[in-house]
Image (cartoon, rainbow, N blue to C red):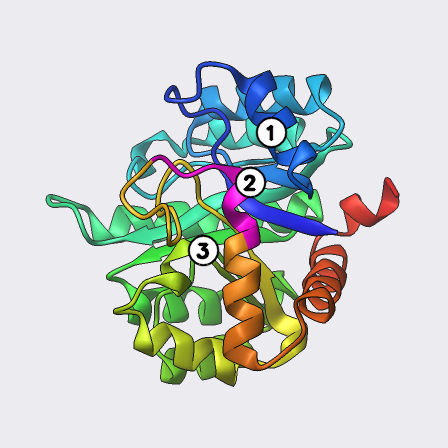
């Protein structure tokens, strides 16, 4: 099955959610995980998962808004995580790109949501932008609380990937893998062991070639899969099977529903 492990169906740019889901289903994409970024998107994710059999969802607070990861909100997220189609905590992590930002507050919110994932007995999806060293540090400090988690839309180096592999991390690639200037990312895609790789779109962001610069859609995860297969010298069908097995391993609640 072709699977988009991280997209944002809740984004307001998608006016017709049903049409979007139907598009990827008819196009050969089997299912997706709708990633949350604030409390409102968690509730909307739950609604969409109830409405569409092929949609799963996460719950979490994005690092752009760490002040919202209050104890009360974390308890609400824990309750939402018990839904049968809530498959991960996320997206959580660190983002030092947009200024101003509060490193300490982001790190506390990240660690608190790793603890939330442990309480929920779920993996988590990590957002890391311009914060590779601190991301590794927070994950290392909290390693006793998780066995596996996902680096969503990975954009780091092989050297950082080596550290993250030792922590049990999986890696998902988005449309950036298809960009002409993504030589370092292609190096990572070649380096990683086959059993740690997933595919995503992060739609509506980061549309792959030949759609770069346009609105991204879950359907386009097929282009990411094809690029991944080409880079690794694999048959596309074999790559699809490997990625699907990795998806089931990392997100056991999906496997339980099959």
Residues in magenta? 215-222
Please give the residue where the numbered disc 3 appears in the rendered image. 174
Residue 234 vs residue 190: left or right?
Answer: right
Q: Which quadrant would residue 15 be assigned to in this image?
A: top left
Q: Is residue 65 left or right of residue 39?
A: left
Mark 1 lies on a secondary structure that is helix
Furthest residue toward front: 210
Q: Identify the residue under disc 1.
A: 23
Label 2 element class: helix
How packed is label 2: few (under 14 Cα within 10 Å), some, or many (20 or more)? Answer: many
Q: Residues within 10 Å of mark 1 (few under 14, many from 20)?
A: some
Q: Which residue is mark 2?
A: 219
Quadrant housing residue 135:
bottom left
Q: Earlier in the sequence, mark 2 or mark 1?
A: 1
As rendered, which of 235 and 13 lies closer to the eye? Answer: 235
Quarter assignment of residue 175: bottom left
Work out how far the residue at label 1 is from the one at label 3, CA to CA, in angstroms: 19 Å
- Seen in the picture, residue 171 relative to 102 is either above or below; the reply is below
């Amino acid at each position: 099955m072709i699977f988009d492990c991280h997209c944002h169906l809740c984004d307001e740019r998608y006016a017709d959610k049903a049409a979007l889901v139907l598009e990827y289903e008819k196009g050969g994409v089997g299912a997706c995980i709708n990633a949350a970024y604030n409390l409102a998107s968690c509730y909307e994710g739950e609604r969409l998962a109830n409405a569409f059999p092929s949609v799963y969802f996460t719950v979490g607070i994005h690092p752009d808004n760490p002040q919202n990861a209050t104890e009360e909100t974390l308890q609400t997220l824990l309750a939402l995580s018990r839904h049968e189609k809530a498959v991960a905590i996320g997206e959580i992590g660190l983002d030092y790109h947009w200024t101003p930002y509060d490193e300490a507050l982001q790190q506390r919110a990240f660690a608190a949501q790793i603890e939330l994932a442990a309480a929920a007995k779920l993996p988590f999806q990590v957002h890391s932008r311009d914060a590779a060293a601190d991301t590794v540090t927070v994950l290392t400090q909290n390693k006793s609380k998780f066995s596996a988690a996902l680096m969503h839309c990975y954009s780091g180096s092989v050297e950082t990937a080596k550290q993250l592999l030792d922590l049990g991390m999986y890696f998902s690639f988005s449309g950036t893998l298809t960009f002409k200037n993504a030589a370092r990312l292609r190096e990572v895609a070649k380096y990683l062991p086959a059993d740690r790789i997933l595919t995503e779109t992060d739609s509506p962001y980061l549309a792959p070639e030949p759609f770069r610069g346009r609105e991204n859609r879950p359907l386009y995860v097929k282009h990411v899969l094809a690029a991944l297969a080409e880079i690794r010298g694999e048959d596309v069908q074999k790559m699809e099977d490997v990625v699907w097995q990795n998806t089931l391993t990392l997100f056991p609640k999906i496997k339980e529903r099959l």
